[in-house]
Image (spheres, rainbow, N blue to C red):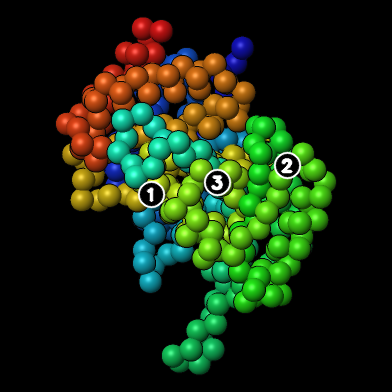
Amino acid sequence: MSRPTVTLIPGDGIGPEVTRAVVRVLKAAGFDPEWETFSAGAEAVAEHGTTLPPSLLDSVARNKVALKGPITTPVGKGFTSVNVGLRKALDLYANLRPVWNLPSVPSRFSGVDLVIVRENTEDLYAGLEHVVVPGVVESLKIITEKATTRIAAFAFEYARRHQRKKVTIVHKANIMKLGDGLFLDTARKVAARYPEVACEDRIVDAACMHLVMHPERMDVLLLPNLYGDIVSDLCAGLVGGLGVVPSANLGEGGVGVFEAVHGTAPDIAGRDIANPTALLLSAVLMLQHLQEDEKAARIMTALREVLESGHVTPDLGGTATTTSFADAICRRIEQG
């Protein structure tokens, strides 16, 4: 059997370190593809004059699968988000973020088991804005029936396929009666096609309150782009932070970019102390996407065992290095 080819975007800051660690763990589990490696963001600007070289986009479109480390997005100035650019260029319309507790990871809650499904292509997060006159900026919130139908169908199909009990539509239709009203009404119409999956809706501020009071009452959450960005980070905070949750950006035809959603942590870059768990969990989602379920299960078992052993990186209260943490997972995999 020929080896698959996967696009690899190590990113910047701690990105290259955690990416190297994850590639080693994947190889130990028996997943050793041909990697096509590309820079993006500031590094790509220096090399190619653009944050997203056409060769990178061509690679993802051809290979259908990419693994991506964190990339810096300048705040308030500079180039636009590489993440947003990838999603737009490849029409990666669904952002999937499962959130659950991991063994021995400190958190305020136990038993959290949530799935965030975020529309990825429109809404305020698309960044459509302009200066009307000096001192006045207009940002456009675009919600369409087409995009909402597509993401709602994704959420309910996911719930059906994974035997999830309920989908909660999150919105602000009490205030934005047209935009969020269209999102809510369209999602409800899709829900009617899935009678075996319970459906409810919550106003976004109330949903946030309930999440930090009773996260066990939620299951799958369906959100427009901006609320999804905020709520997914809130949910990550319930289980220990962005360093321990995965993310997938999925499009038509099986295209998927699997990424760590935490920052680049330039203050610890190059010190071999970054936690690769988030990117490793994203790689597990990638394996499941590729129907490599046995390899994904082996990695998850080894990761849980290492976390339970206490051999963890400083962010989780331990003294392990990025390298030694990955070494420990590889050993567990090889021991079976």
Q: Are marks 1 and 2 in contact (CB under 8 Å)?
A: no
Q: Give the mark nearest the N terminus, 2 or 3.
A: 2
Residue at the (80%, 43%) spot, across then down: 195
Front residue of this view, candidates 70 and 288: 288
Q: Secondary structure at mark 1?
A: helix
Residue at the (71%, 36%) spot, across then down: 160
Mark 3, other Cα within 10 Å: few <14 / some 14–19 / many ≥20: few
**Label 2 is placed on what type of residue?**
Val
Residue at the (36%, 34%) spot, across then down: 277
Q: Is residue 117 visible?
A: yes
Q: How many marks?
A: 3
Q: Give the mark nearest the N terminus, 3 or 1.
A: 3
Query: Which residue matches tag 2?
Result: 197
Q: Position of residue 73 (x, y in %)?
A: 39, 59
Residue at the (51%, 38%) spot, across then down: 113
Q: Position of residue 21 (x, y in %)?
A: 33, 29
From the viewer's perspective, is the residue at label 2 or at label 3 nearer?
3
Q: CA distance from mark 2 to mark 3?
A: 15 Å
Q: Which mark is residue 237?
A: 1
Q: Quadrant of the C terminus?
A: top left
Front residue of this view, candidates 202 and 297: 202
Q: Secondary structure at mark 3?
A: helix
**Label 1 is placed on what type of residue?**
Gly
Q: Position of residue 156 (x, y in %)?
A: 71, 44
**Label 3 is placed on what type of residue?**
Arg
Mark 2, other Cα within 10 Å: few <14 / some 14–19 / many ≥20: some
Query: Which residue matches tag 3?
Result: 217
Q: Is residue 208 above or below residue 131?
A: above
